[in-house]
Amino acid sequence: MLSVRHLLGIKYLLKEDIELILHTADNFLDVINRPIKKVPSLRDITVVNLFFENSTRTRLSFELAEKRLSADVINFSASSSSVSKGETLTDTVNNILAMKVDMVVMRHPKAGAAHFLAQHVNAKIINAGDGAHEHPTQALLDAFSIRRKLGTLEGVKVAIIGDILHSRVALSNIFCLKKMGAEVIVCGPPTLIPRDIESLGVRVETDLRKALQWCDVANMLRIQLERQEINYFPSLREYAHLFGLNKELLNSLNKEIVIMHPGPINRGVEITSEVADSPHSIILQQVENGVAVRMAALYLLANRPD
Ligand code: CP
């Protein structure tokens, strides 16, 4: 049984919780690769997907995971709701819960929004990304994808490369990988590396080639221009030159590394198309695995007694 009632962040999970989610996801990955991809596990459960911020992968992946588990699903997008008329978050959610909804999956631009909701409404909450804070299901699917590819997380060397400062994916990945025994380097322009990040047990490297020569897995992060209120580097061209992964650099390493990206990709900035679409890349496996991991998270939370 999970030690938590909500999935708000990897920070609050035990290693045993992560093991349980990944093990359950292994079973669900088998299910979604069968001719009949649906199981009745959440037949009496209603889930609302509340998205206050744009999403492609996470929103569709949760919706598919819920449908594969036979849950009833309702989707809410802030732009077409009464939020635009000034309704508060708690009022919005309590009105939805009054319709007998059991679980809430929420993406929100503000860090802490999922915690706030968990304290103020009576439903199980899954954080689908809150500002620059956490994106727990992304980190779980990333860990799951590494483990499926390399057989273990223990001792695996992972370089997380790019805009670490604004990335909820980076923070959740660091928590998850460290709990599971992996080694982690963060790499990017010094302006995009948070001060004191070493206190999380990671090493900082500002030379991309050195980070790539060290690692087994490179997780290339998107430059999050929408969260950058000032210029953190001179130009995208210079960023791509110093921190972008291209075929020449990859080939010059003389070793095999696994390439990951949470999406959406800025092709030609953090990663070229040749690399993103190469056999080294497991970017589309991450997306496939995301459905199984989200099925696992939904199933384990829904079946956990209060
Ligand atoms: N990886 C991820 O969170 O992608 P979306 O923003 O498309 O959901």
Image (tube, rainbow, N blue to C red):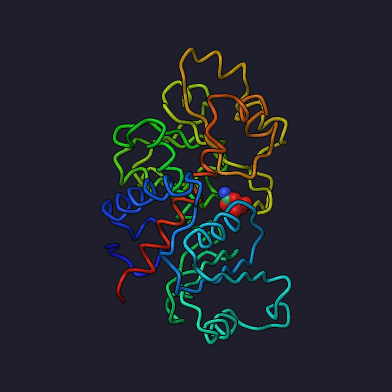
Could you say where residue 5 lies in the image, as x and y percent from the top left? 35, 70
Above or below, 111 against 261 in this view is: below
**Vertical comparison of 298 with 189: above or below:** below
Residue drawn at the location 57% of the way across and 86% of the way down: 95
* In the foreground, 153 or 164: 153
Q: Does residue 290 appear to the left or right of 180 in the view shown?
A: right
Image coords of residue 62 (percent x, y): 54, 59
Image coords of residue 41 (percent x, y): 40, 64
Instruction: In this rendered view, identify the residue nearer to me: 175 or 64.
Output: 64
Position of residue 57 relative to residue 238, above or below, is: below
Q: Position of residue 134 (x, y in %)?
A: 48, 57
* 133 left or right of 274 in image: left
- Picture residue at 46% right of the left edge, 56% below the top: 294
For the N terminus, which image quadrant?
bottom left
**Which quadrant is the C terminus positioned in?**
bottom left
Residue occupying image coordinates x 63% and y 31%: 271
